[in-house]
Image (cartoon, rainbow, N blue to C red):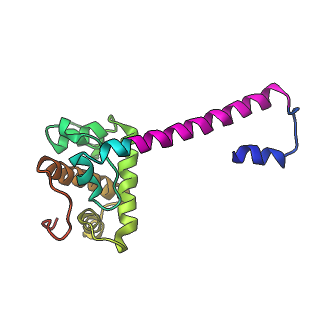
Amino acid sequence: MALLEATKDSYPVISKDGVRCEQVRNYVKRIADLKEKTEKLVKQMVKLSIARKEYRVLISFPGIGELGDIRRFKNHKQLNAYVGIDIMRYQSGNTFYKDKINKRGNNKLRKILFHMIQMMITLRQKTKNHIVEYYDKLKTQSQGKPHKIASIACVNKFFKVAFHLMTHNITYNYEAAPTC
C-alpha cells in the first residue's frame, strides 16, 4: 500500500496504463493478499497451540514464541543439529581449525532463535531470565565471547532448558529454576 502511495508523488517514466505499472499493481495486490493470509494462519496456529503443553512451556520464557513439537527429538543435541548450531570441528594432522557452527540446519529457524535471544537480552531490565544471565556470564569472562558466539551459546542453553521442561511438562519459572 505504501508503494502505491509513493507512486502518486513520483514522476512517471512510463504510462500508468503500461505493462510495468500493471505488473507492479499485481505484485502489490499479491503481497497484500499474502500478508492477510499469513495473519490468518498465525491466528489459527495460536488457537491450535494454546491447548498444547509445549506452547505453555515455551511461552513461559520471556520473549519466546512457539518452536514446535520438540518431542520428536531424542535430546537437545538433535535440536541443535536440526537448527544448524551444532559445532563443526575440522582438524588435519597437527592443524586445528577454529570451531564453527555447521549451518546445515533450518536457517530460518536459526535466525528466529537468534532474534529471540536478542529480544531476551533487550528485555533484561523488565524480567529475569537465566538465559540472559548465561549470556552476561559468557561476555564477562576473562576471555569474553563475541556477541554472536555468546548468543548462539544461549540458543544451545535454551534448547537444553526447553527440552527438559517439555519432557517433564514444567513451565519456566525463574525463582523455582536452579541457577545456570
Above-or-below relation of 138 to 164: below
For residue 94, which quarter of the picture? top left
| Residue 112 in sight here | yes
Magenta stretch: helix, strand or loop mostly = helix
Q: In this picture, which residue range is highlighted in magenta?
A: 17-44
Pick whichever, 175 or 149, lies toward us.
175
Above-or-below relation of 26 to 140: above
Was residue 67 drawn as part of the magenta stretch in this picture?
no
Q: Residue furthest bottom?
A: 125
Residue 114 position in % (x across, y down): 37, 51
For residue 79, which quarter of the picture? top left
Pick whichever, 90 or 140, lies toward us.
140
Pick whichever, 95 or 118, lies toward us.
118
Residue for point 26% across, 62% down: 131
Residue for point 40% across, 41% down: 44
Horizontally, residue 74 falls left or right of residue 79, namely left
Horizontally, residue 45 falls left or right of residue 4, namely left
Was residue 26 drawn as part of the magenta stretch in this picture?
yes
Above-or-below relation of 23 to 5: above
The C terminus lies in quadrant: bottom left
Residue 26 position in % (x across, y down): 70, 30
Residue 144 position in % (x across, y down): 29, 65
Residue for point 44% across, 39% down: 41
Q: Residue furthest top?
A: 19
For residue 127, which quarter of the picture? bottom left
Residue 120 position in % (x across, y down): 35, 62
